[in-house]
Amino acid sequence: MKSKEELYEKYIKPSLSDARRRSNKDTEYTYFSLNPTTKTIGKGKYYYIETYGCQGNEADSETMAGILEAIGFKKASKIEESDIIILNTCAIRENAENRAWGELGRLKSFKRNNPDLIIGFAGCMPQEEKTIKRLLEKYPHIDIVFGTHNIDKLPIYVEEAMFNKERVIEVYSKEGGIVDRLPKSRNHQYKAWVNIMFGCDEFCTYCIVPYTRGKERSRKKEDIIEEVKKLVNDGYQEITLLGQNVNAYGKDIKNSDYTFGDLLNDLAKTKIPRIRFTTSHPHDLDQKTMDAIQNNDNVMPFFHLPVQSGSNTILKKMNRHYTREEYIDVVKRLKEAVPGISITTDIIVGFPNESEEDFQDTLSLVDECQFEGAFTFIFSPREGTPAATFDDSINPMIKKERLRILNKKINDLYLKGNKRFVNEIVLVLVDGPSKNDETILSGYTEHNKLVNFKGDAKMIGKIVEVRIVEARTWFLIGEQIEKN
Ligand code: 5AD
Ligand code: SF4
């Protein structure tokens, strides 16, 4: 019988310290292809994918789904009916990890009832050594473990688990090149995620992403434009360009000065009705990008620009590469370049040793910038990142209280941002019936405001004019405009 150490040695497993290193080698680009013998291995079988975390993970899950469908699997309508279940996990904060561990525990009974069930564990968590150790010690019912850099190898892993009954754990610390033209099974019929780059080189001191997603690599512009043209042909109304820091697009491609603003201009020419993007880093945001939003009607007047803190001391400790004053200036320029633009942000409270004064600086920055929404978090130490080792003497209750005060302010601004559209006619891309009321349609405006209104189901998937009659904190209430 093998010891735990021997077992652990058998697999290809990650190392966060290797993941930290950056090479200056050019990115290698290849296209996905399937071995003809794997094309039917999933015939008659069903898959189910559970996704945790950011839009990047949602897009990865669509790729996993596309690959599974390409090898014959069909999407299960219920988790109980599936032959393969994949958890696509997130490592950004502790509570995201705890949710995935909880779910993994629940799946034990599924495996007991159906020993042929294949369970996969994927995404950012497997990129951490501690996850692999815990999986090996406590979760023998997991069949396949892979990370963010080898989704394209899913057919091989499924084949091994199905036919050789071998447990597969294969996680690369280093990113490798870009495998493009991966199949996708998109969750939405008229809104699509489009990855434009992978990885992050910012190394904010609290963040695990540069370790779990590797070096910044941009897709070739030709591949992105081709994907968007196809989406236009397929009737898609909206794309959201994805990257950890989209404003750094193209900067890793040597001998090229083609950057994010150029990409926006080129994608606008495809005539896709709506272009959005996320996420941005303030210090890479340039004038060309602001001009591209202003000059192209189909680039939406909405910007998510994470600030993280309003205190220069904390920003420095976070390694954010900008000051409070510089951030406020970027927001001012953005508002001048694109009048009426809606700006949202991300904020972390309770960073190690954040003082009351630091926190007050965050509150006053929120006032100055007049954000129309924010994702707010309490700092969560991530093993392997510098901030996890910083001294912290702030009481957790104080952190909670700061979050409450901040959220109150953000909610007031959310409502204020919504109120400016009352009595206006806005354009809404209609998603479908609202969650709570079948007779009500809901969708998003150009400024990314949620609108509920009574309308005809025929409008779903279309961009329609709606008159706003009332503003609530989280949504607007509208009236359908009759067209003759
Ligand atoms: N603790 C709390 N929030 C974090 N974020 C990233 N890392 C952490 C962490 N360790 C937040 C940042 C980022 C968003 C996606 O998640 O605000 O912008
Ligand atoms: Fe994390 Fe900072 Fe990169 Fe965003 S920019 S993914 S917060 S390291």
Image: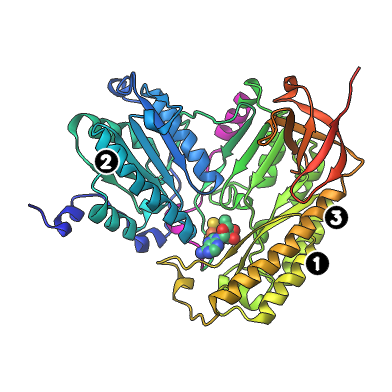
Circle on res. 368: 1
User: Residue 433 placed where, x, y %?
Assistant: 69, 30
The percent position of residue 153, horizontal first and vertical second, equals 34, 36
Q: Foreground mark, 3 or 1?
A: 1
Q: Secondary structure at mark 1?
A: helix
Residue 286 position (above or below residue 396): above
Q: Whole-Å distance between the Cαs marked 3 and 2?
A: 54 Å
Question: Horizontal and vertical percent for residue 95?
Answer: 48, 58
Residue at image point 27% right, 34% down: 113
Viewer-closest of 401 and 363:
401
Whichever of labels 3 and 2 marks the residue nearer the N terminus, that label is 2
Camera-nearest residue between 189 and 176: 189
Q: Which residue is mark 3?
A: 336
Which of discs 1 and 2 lies nearer the camera? The answer is 2
- Residue placed under numbered mark 2 in the picture: 143
Q: Which residues are magenta?
A: 206-230
Whether the magenta-drawn stretch holds residue 217 is answered as yes
